[in-house]
Amino acid sequence: MEKLNIPLSVPNLSKDIVPMIEECIETGWVSTGGRFITEFEEKVASYVGVEKAVGVQSGSAGLHVAYRVMGVEAGDEVICPTATFIATVNPMIYIGAYPVFMDCDDTLNMDLEKLEEFLENNGQWTMKNGKEVLINKNSSRIIKAICIVHVFGNPIDMVKVMEIAKKYKLKVIEDSAESLGSFYSKDGEKKAHTGTLGDIGIYSFNANKILTTGGGGMVVAKDKKILDKVRFLSVQAKTDPLYFTHDEIGYNYRLTNVASAFGVSQMNQLEGFIENKIKNYNLYKEAIKNIDGLEMLPFNEDTRANHWFYSIMVAKDKYGLDRDELLVKLNECGIQSRPLWGLMHDQKPLKQYEAYKIEKARHYVDNLLNIPCSTNLTSEQVEAVVGKLKGFKK
Ligand SMILES: *Cc1c(COP(=O)(O)O)cnc(C)c1O
């Protein structure tokens, strides 16, 4: 069998980075100070429509600081999806907080009806230290925040999320690691970018994300005080720069100048990347429509999703192969594909935490397949993948 080489999602870098890296070498600004950091932060901030953004070393680091700044403390609960990458959850555990896992709906995002139902049935207002707080009746712990994820770049209904959060006085963290460039748009209305609608949002620039700095992340928020605190914690919480006094425990999480140079270059290409993602998505969709038993999942209407990852659902009764059989065949012929993440509430270190009525997520874990979606994927490669998908049908 001919061996193809079509990766799932790889970086798409441009040589215009080279002079910037040379500048880093010549000036010695290779670490956590330098002009590319500010330039990259300004580019991201103005692109997503906020005043300020803070560069950090990864999306995970951004989430860690975001939870801290949102007041999540040891013993608090944070509601989050079970269908996500584990980086959403790990920083909660670092803090000693307790995740409560929610199911997804047919958009792959958190099921907001179940979220409301959970809060309605299990939430209880209680006085603690003279303050009214929401506790979880099952655990008696304070429910502090919700962390939502725009899965595969598909924007969740943030209006609804914020409504629920307001009613229950919860902080909202937007894990927008996958959704840089996704925004809500109704004709004539101003664009509202994912990451900027909650209390705090984070983006990731890991190698397989839509834009990469090798490794990196960015934190955004409308409230500048929140971002000042993020910056402060990301540089070891130094209160006095000369005498090195620290009144809090911080982190070494600041983004480097070298990584930021990659970011500056990549930001110039981002809209082009998204155009390619959408073009290839539509090519796949047209072709896959005609393959019985395969269905491409849509992105939400009234949004311009960045189309980061493409998902197809495999129905064995019609297609003849189940998802795993198809996955093996594709990978054997050099078309890299993968299933949805293992669910969070099934992971060994996370099994002990509460999970609320998980039903749909299982169906997607069993039947979903991600197919190649790099921003430099060519239409010939899309045709080759489609050819195999047709060929393997029984
Ligand atoms: C990639 C990703 C992260 C973590 O980002 P890193 O930069 O890899 O630390 C967090 N959440 C989700 C949903 C992700 O996909």
Image (cartoon, helix red, strand yellow):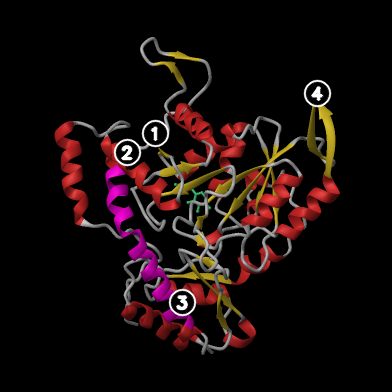
Q: Cβ of disc 3 within 8 Å of ligand 1?
A: no
Q: What residue is at 42 percent from the left and 29 percent from the top?
A: 252
In the rendered structure, does residue 263 fall within the stretch colored magenta?
A: yes
The residue tagged 1 is 254
The nearer-to-camera label among 1 and 3 is: 1
Classify residue 181 as left or right of residue 69. Answer: left
What residue is disc 3 on? 329
Q: Disc 4 versus disc 2: distance between alpha carbons?
A: 43 Å
Which range is magenta?
259-285
Residue 208 drawn above or below residue 382: above
Helix, strand or loop at mark 3: helix
The alpha-carbon separation of the residues under discs 2 and 3 comes to 43 Å
Question: Dot 2: few (<14), some (14–19), or many (≥20) neighbours within 10 Å?
Answer: many
Q: Position of residue 385 (x, y in %)?
A: 40, 79
Does the residue tagged 1 have its C-beta within 8 Å of any atom of ligand 1? no
Mark 1 and mark 3: Cα distance apart in space: 42 Å
Residue under label 2, please give it.
Answer: 37
Q: Estimate how packed mark 1 is, as few (under 14), some (14 to 19) or many (20 or more) residues with alpha carbons within 10 Å.
A: many
The type of residue carrying mark 4 is Gly
Q: Is residue 374 left or right of residue 153?
A: left
The image shows residue 236, relative to residue 373, as above or below, that is: above
The reply to whether callout 1 and callout 3 are in contact (CB within 8 Å) is no
